[in-house]
């Protein structure tokens, strides 16, 4: 007698392939080979009697049937995850898996210390950390939490502020030796300003200052622009290529070591918030509640 749900591993493989973007990436994530992944997809498509994915040597895309099946199976697998974590939590020890997405700035400079503290308290919880500057779809991609920067639009999400991070203007000593320091904001316009282009608009992200108690958005202009990862401006500044604005928690160690120097400190860079967001519809597991408390400093 065949089991009714003996194909669940193939379903998980299908979802992993879509989330990772390729058979090779899915194979790495699942500790197997692309050929095994390919056979699992073929079995699933044979079982369903329809094609789920259009696969070529260079691309992978969902068919209409695949898109519908992905939506339903993600929801089903999420329910299974929730059921397992709920039962495990009854045993006393907090266990399970948490998926969280964070931007590169917070992911590299703030989360490591927080996750180290969390791991010491909850060694049986597995945390999957996705570091990206793309705004992930929490429900669609099965994330428990995401960390977002800046003012949040009303999206029906629950948002908890993690911190207000101060901005600072910096450059390298080599740049100071070559170009000197600007005396004021007008002089800053004559310097090499390293800009970050917003993915959503393609425009340079404005530098934000406080001048004489008033907020000021200043549009930097530069021949050298960075896309996708704002940390690139810090690396370029450290290499002596110009001035950038970044968060003080990123620059502080470099400032203390003399790798970077502060520029126009009297302008007092404004702060930008970082918030933890999650969907109100997703049931909060014991592991998720524990991580929430840890990130908010409530432990």
Image: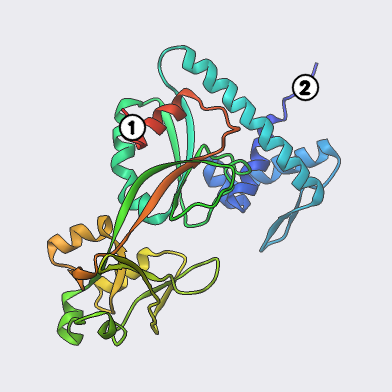
Disc 2 crowd, CA 10 A, few/some/many (<14, 14-19, 20+): few
Decide: marks 2, 1 in contact (CB < 8 A)? no
- Residue, x 39% and y 65% (percent of image)? 230
Secondary structure under the numbered disc 1 in the rendered image: helix
Residue 37, image x and y in percent?
Answer: 65, 43
Label 2, on which residue?
A: 4
Report which quarter residue 200 is drawn in: bottom right
Secondary structure under the numbered disc 2 in the rendered image: loop
Label 1, on which residue?
A: 118
Vertical placement of residue 42 versus 185, above or below:
above
Q: Quadrant of the N terminus?
A: top right
State left or right for residue 83 relative to residue 297: right
Vertical placement of residue 261 versus 189, above or below:
above
Of callouts 2 and 1, the N-terminal one = 2
Residue 96, image x and y in percent?
Answer: 48, 26
Vertical placement of residue 223 versus 138, above or below:
below
Q: Furthest residue to the top?
A: 91
Q: Quadrant of the C terminus?
A: top left
- Residue, x 59% and y 21% (percent of image)? 83
- Calculate the distance from the C-alpha at mark 2 to the C-alpha at mark 1: 39 Å
Residue 114, image x and y in percent?
Answer: 31, 39
Residue 58, image x and y in percent?
Answer: 66, 64
Vertical placement of residue 155 versus 93, above or below:
below
């Amino acid at each position: 007698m065949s089991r009714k749900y003996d194909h669940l591993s193939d379903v998980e493989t299908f979802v992993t392939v879509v989330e990772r973007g390729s058979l090779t990436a899915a194979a790495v994530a699942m500790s197997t080979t692309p050929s095994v992944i390919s056979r699992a997809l073929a079995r699933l498509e044979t079982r369903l009697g329809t094609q789920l994915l259009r696969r070529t040597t260079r691309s992978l895309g969902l068919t209409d049937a695949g898109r519908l099946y992905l939506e339903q199976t993600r929801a089903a697998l999420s329910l299974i995850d929730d059921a397992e974590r709920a039962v495990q939590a009854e045993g006393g020890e907090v266990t399970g898996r948490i998926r969280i997405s964070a931007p590169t700035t917070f992911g590299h400079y703030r989360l490591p210390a927080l996750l180290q503290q969390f791991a010491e308290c909850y060694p049986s919880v597995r945390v999957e950390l996705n570091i990206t500057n793309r705004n992930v779809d929490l429900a669609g991609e099965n994330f428990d939490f995401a960390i977002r920067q800046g003012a949040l639009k009303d999206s029906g999400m629950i948002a908890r502020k993690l911190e207000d991070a101060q901005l600072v203007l910096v450059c390298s000593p080599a740049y100071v030796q070559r170009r000197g320091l600007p005396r004021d904001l007008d002089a800053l316009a004559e310097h090499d300003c390293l800009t970050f282009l917003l993915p959503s608009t393609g425009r340079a992200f404005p530098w934000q200052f406080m001048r004489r108690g008033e907020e000021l958005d200043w549009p930097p202009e530069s021949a050298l622009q960075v896309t996708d990862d704002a940390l690139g401006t810090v690396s370029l500044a450290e290499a002596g290529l110009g001035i950038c604005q970044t968060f003080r928690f990123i620059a502080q160690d470099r400032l203390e070591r003399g790798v970077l120097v502060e520029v126009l400190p009297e302008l007092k860079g404004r702060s930008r918030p970082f918030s933890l967001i999650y969907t109100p519809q997703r049931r909060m597991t014991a592991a998720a509640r524990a991580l929430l408390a840890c990130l908010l400093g409530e432990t």
